[in-house]
Structure formats: structure tokens, C-alpha cells
Amino acid sequence: MSVISLQGIKKIYHLGDNTVHALRGVSLDIEEGEFVAITGPSGSGKSTMMHILGCLDSPTEGSYLLNGKNVSNLPRQELADIRNRMIGFVFQGFNLLPRTTAVENVELPLLYTRPVMSNAERNKRAVEALTAMGLADRLDHHPSQLSGGQQQRVAIARALVNKPALILADEPTGNLDSKTSIEVMRLLQELREKQGITIVLITHEPEIAAYGTRIISVRDGVIISDEKNTPRNPEEDLAAVAPIAAASGY
Amino acid sequence: MGFAAHLIALAWQALMRNKAQTLMAMLGVTVGVGALVTSMALGRGAQEAIKDQLLAAGANMIIVNSGNYQTERAGAGGSPADHGYIPSPKPQRTPYLVKGPIPGFPNVRLLNAHFEDDPMAEHDHPLASERLGDNMAGLGAAATLTLDDAEAIRNEIPGIDFVASGVHENARISLKADPMKQWFTRLHGTESDLPVIRSGWIFPYGRFLSASQVRDAEQTMVIGRVVAARLFGEGINPVGETIVLWNQDFRVIGVVDSTSWAAQPSAGDDQFDAIYIPVTTVHSLLNLSKLNTITITTESAGETTRISKQIEDILRRRHGITEQMPDDFTVKTQAQQLLGKGLSPDVARIVAGNLESIDALTIEQLSASLQRANRTMLALLAGVATVSLLVGGIGVMNLLLLSVTQRTREVGLRMAMGARGSDIASQFVLEAIVLSVVGGLIGAACGVLVAESLEQVFQWSTDVSVISMVFAIIVAAVLGIVSSVYPAHRASQLNPIGALNHE
Ligand SMILES: Nc1ncnc2c1ncn2[C@@H]1O[C@H](COP(=O)(O)OP(=O)(O)O)[C@@H](O)[C@H]1O
Ligand SMILES: [Mg+2]
């Protein structure tokens, strides 16, 4: 059974008299443990797809099965519960709460689990997730006291903390320098390899898409190519970046 | 710490991220609740003061007298010393009136007295064989009240607090240590719980008769402040001194004084120009069995009229009085007496200002007119409190609307993480409640301080009750809830995508 199964997904926006066809019939299946990079130029419909995949929005037409359950036309409240249990989000802008510690940021999804999770359990899981991201010594730091890479790792810890079926990352490297971007990609690869987590990554950068096991290209709301990919090795890229970083004083 | 406590802690954190705004909004609530607490304290204080004064003045007291001297005495000039005294049945007696200082005795001052009213004047040696019976003591045909009457009143009428029986005489007393110091005053044979009935009493020296002193018919005496001042001098503690009454020694055990502006002690009054000894002592020394009075206090001052009527019905029935016959007793409320004398200028002013005819005045009306004045002040304060609370509520609402706008991205993020609309709404409501309750607690504390200072500085009477504090906190919480409904609803309806992309 596929983690994700889209059939003829269409999304139409109405802007006054204009209708915008953001997605014009997208069908695809994503299996467990895949690292799928969705790429395409600006305005091609990547974000719209990500919103539908993330149960933040419903398609105008078509069906979406998430872990076999049809979620294409659920009420807001049920979509919220599905997001909480099944999906971890990583955003371009990190979206951490300011003046809030790393642990508290990571605890955020656990505040909305049903039934309610005990304070101790919530804290324990958040600390575990941060430790797994190599941030055991940054638990009580506020986002402003963390580097961009560290902030994105807090965000990844937050995405993972409720053990979702799927991680959706929308331009996760958009705000990071190239070395940190490569480190984040290495981290996502490790999650897939060691924990078998399914990842859908959205990026307009082909170099970043190249870290995935499968690359889907979108244009004008339709898939124009969908190919298996041999992931790039981040270690090699880091080795190549290091001298430049060293030369530029990092 | 439970989940709810955790959410409250989070709400507090969220509020503290915007200290300045939060404090501004909180200030509004603080002022509102402070005003509310202060006005409640003043309102209750005024209420209590009015009630205390009315009770202290005996507003809830009914006095039943033996006989109906108003009809018997028609046309006779009232003399202050007779206070419900039953006139002697022997009309041939000519009163020997003395007013002012007695020549040769500068310390003895008789205000206005009938020597014949002193049952001992013609019997200086009350040996057992010579003791006066009811008739000789002036309690003859007119002494109609019995202990059984008192018992019937106690048992048959609802709404009664205390019933006390009493025998009242005029008496000449002198100091054992200095027999030239004499005073002619009112004697009350009574029981130990009289001070409960006369709620406006205090004892600057000593205490009242005890139950055992009454039971054992001891020769102990409590003297009114006026008597104490006349015999011993103002401000002198007479407890332990010996006073001679009917050639018998009585030990002084206390001095009684008034707390009420409506009943200030004066010479010739019935309560403080008076002495109190056990009713049993009177009965045994004078060989009496009947009562002059039955004193009743009602639970509420507003019921004296109804209860007076019921007492009349019961006594007429018990005394077998037919329709055409007049009562052989009189039922009076203390309020009626109060209006004739000793009414304080404050009360008199209010009364004159609010009532058409003083004759028609009942204690209910007196009380009502005082309360009317009080209500005017309360309405003003309540107005101030309401406006302050309204302003406080608008402040909270403003803060939250601003906060929802500022934190739109946070709302979107929380929704993406699985928060339902209701989770978002309750978060904002909870923040508003925390803000308002903290503001309210500070306001309540300030309100108490203000009320206390008003009491200290202006001698206004205030009364801060636990209930009013709880009420204030509930008002604050409700204020928080009401003012957060709209902002919270708006936040809960945000579209997660739009909210996440909000700048
Ligand atoms: N909420 C919306 N209302 C109207 N049009 C929208 C909305 N969101 C996206 N679109 C339109 O849909 C198309 C696809 O947008 P999007 O999915 O954001 O593309 P991408 O993320 O690939 O840049 C664009 O033409 C965009 O203008
Ligand atoms: Mg986009």
C-alpha cells in the first residue's frame, strides 16, 4: 500500500472573474521510504501540491489516499487531527516560535494530540527528538540564540516528534547557505535510510532535488517528468564546499 | 503540573512576550476590578453601618409593658423618671418634686423625681416579713404580664431572636463609702442575656450579670454610664465598689455604655441612667412574682410591625380581653421611642428630608430612607466600576485583536501542527482569562487598600468580604471571556495556508 496515492487531483482558484488552474490533474503514488523531490519553476503548482499533500487544503477534484484513507474531502477539524498524527512539516522560514525554547518549540505538535499527552511524556519526547538532531546541548536556547542550520534542525525535530508517516519539506534550504543546506539534506537522507521515513521535498533548485531518490518535475499544474534518481552524496559536496567556506572565513 | 496548568503557564508566557501591551490591557482590568471592589466595600460598609446603628438603637426591639398607662395617664405631663412606670393606685399621694441640686448636698442632683415612686421610701428595713408584695411595689392591678406570657411569645411567633422578662423600679442608691453621694435612678431586674438584646451596648468597665449570678439571686449590680459618672466621676472605674440599695449592699461588677449615635446616654434615660441587678434578686428582696416588661428582639428590623401585631393578638387572647375592651398592656417598638428622643441630627435630617410626616414614620421607612441615600452613592460607585470594567474589557479585546494579527503566522503554524480551530480559540480565551484574572487580583488588592485608606483617612465604614473578592475575580474572568470571544473566533477561523504565509 502506498503512503500517498493521488488520482486526478485538480485545484482551481477563483480570483474574482479569473479562474486559476493551479493543478490540472495530478496522479502519483509514493511508497514508504521514498525521498521524493518535487521541482519546477515558480508558479508551477508545487506549493499547491504540498498544501494538498499536507492536508492543509482540499483538492477541487480528484482523490487523495493517505495511508489508504481518503482524505480529499474531510472537514477542517479532521484534517487538523490527520496533520497532527501523520504529517511533519518543515518550512523554508523554519517557523519557530520566537522567545520560546527549542524544547517548547518541539513540544508544539504534542500539545494537540488526542488523547492529551502528559507533560512529562511530552518533554521526554521533545528532548529525545532534539538529541537525535544533535541539539542535546541546545534544549533551552531560544531560536535567536541558534544558527540557521540549528534552527532548521529544531524544526526537523519538531516535524519528527509525533512519529509521522510523512515529512513534507517546502524549500527547507531556501534560507540556508550552501554548506548548511547540504548538511540538512544529509540529515533528511539519514532519516530515510536509518528510520525509513517517507519524505516529500519541494524545491525549485535542481541541485537540492538531486539528493532525493525520485525527482518529479511539475509545470503549469501537471507532472512533466517522474524519474528514479541516484541520490547525490552530501559528504562529497561538503568536502568540496569546505575549502570555499574556509577561504571565505567561515 | 497538569495539562491545564501547563496551558495556563503557556498562556502566561505568550502574554509576557508582549509585556508592554499586556500590562496596558491588564491596567484596564485592574482599575475596573479595583473600582468594583472599593465600591462593594463601601456599599457593604454603609449597609452594615446603617444596620448596626439601627440595631444598636434598638430598631429590632419590641417592648411589652404591663398595663396601658397611656390611657390611664391621659392628660398627665410626662415625667422622664417614669419610663413606662405604672402609677400608684393611690391618687391622694402628692408628689414631692425636686429639681436641680438639693440644698446642702452639692453632689446630689435629682433631675426630676417622685420620691413616692421609690418603693423603699416608706420601708427602710425590708426584712422578709416586711417585704413588699406585688401591690405595694406598684405592680398591683396593672401588673398583667407573667413569665408564661413571655414563654408564649417566645414559642408562638416566628422571627423572634430573644425574649427577656424584666421588673423595673425607681430606686434611690447611695455609695457605701460615702452615703452623702446619692442618686435617684431607674432599676432593672433582668437576666444575663439583656446585652444581646441591647446590641448597642459596650462595657467600658467590668461585665454584665452572669447567668449564675441571676440564678443565685446575687446582690451584684451593673450601673449605667450616667450613674457611674454621677456617683464616682467620669472615667473612674467603679468595679468592686459597693452601692447601697434598699439598705442592702450590692457589689458593682460593670458599667454599661452606648455605641450608637442614635442612643447617646443622658440623664434620665432608661438604659444608661439606670442600674441592673438580677431579676431573681428583685423578686426575692421585694417578694414579687409579676413582670413589668417583656423585651423582644426580632431577627430583622423590618418585621417589628408584624411581630408587634402578633404579640398584641396573643396577649389579648391569653388575658381574655374582648373586642370592646382596651389592652391591659402596651406594645411599643424601640423605633417609636427613638423618634421621640435621642434621634441623632443626621438621622433627623434624612428623615425630615424624605418623609412627609414624622408621625407616620415606621422603622421600615427610616431604614428605607437611609438606604435610599446609600443607594444613590452606591449607584454612583457602581457606575464608575461599570465604566472602568467596560474600558478594561475593551482594552483586553484590543490587545487580543492586535495579538491575533501579530501572531497570525503562529496560528497558521499551530494549525499545521494539528491544532483545531477550537484549540486556537481556547488559547486566546485562556490568555484573556489569565490576563484578566491577574489584573483582577491586582485590582482586588488595590481595591482593598483603597477601601482601607478611605476608612483610615475619612472614617468611612467599609466592609471587604471574601464573597466580594470572589465575585470580583469571577467578574474579571467573565470580562476576559466576553472580551476574547470575538478575537478568539477570528483566530480560529483563519485559513492555515494564508496564516502561514502571512507576513
Ligand atoms: N490562494 C490562491 N489564490 C489564487 N491563486 C493562487 C493561490 N495560490 C496559488 N495560486 C496560483 O496557483 C498557481 C500555482 O501556485 P503555487 O502552487 O504557489 O506555485 P509554486 O509554489 O510552484 O510557485 C500560481 O499561478 C498561483 O498564482
Ligand atoms: Mg511556492
Image: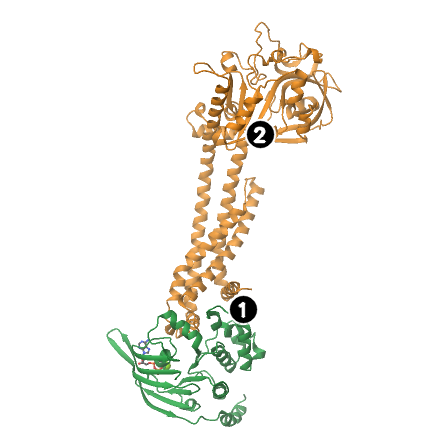
Chain colours: A green, B orange
Judging from the image, mark 1 belongs to the subunit labelled A
Please determine whether, in this image, residue A141 is positioned above or below residue B354.
below
- The residue at which mark 2 appears reads as B197
Which labelled disc corresponds to residue A175? none
User: What quarter of the picture does the C terminus of chain B occupy?
Assistant: bottom left
- The residue at which mark 1 appears reads as A119
Please determine whether, in this image, residue B55 is positioned above or below residue A27.
above
- Badge 1: residue crowd in 10 Å (few <14, some 14–19, many ≥20): some
Residues at discs 1 and 2 both on one chain: no
Q: Position of residue B502 (x, y in %)?
A: 39, 73
Q: Position of residue A36 (x, y in %)?
A: 41, 87
* Mark 2 residue element: helix
User: What quarter of the picture does the N terminus of chain B occupy?
Assistant: bottom right
Judging from the image, mark 2 belongs to the subunit labelled B
* Mark 1 residue element: helix
- Badge 2: residue crowd in 10 Å (few <14, some 14–19, many ≥20): many
Q: Position of residue B203 (x, y in %)?
A: 65, 31
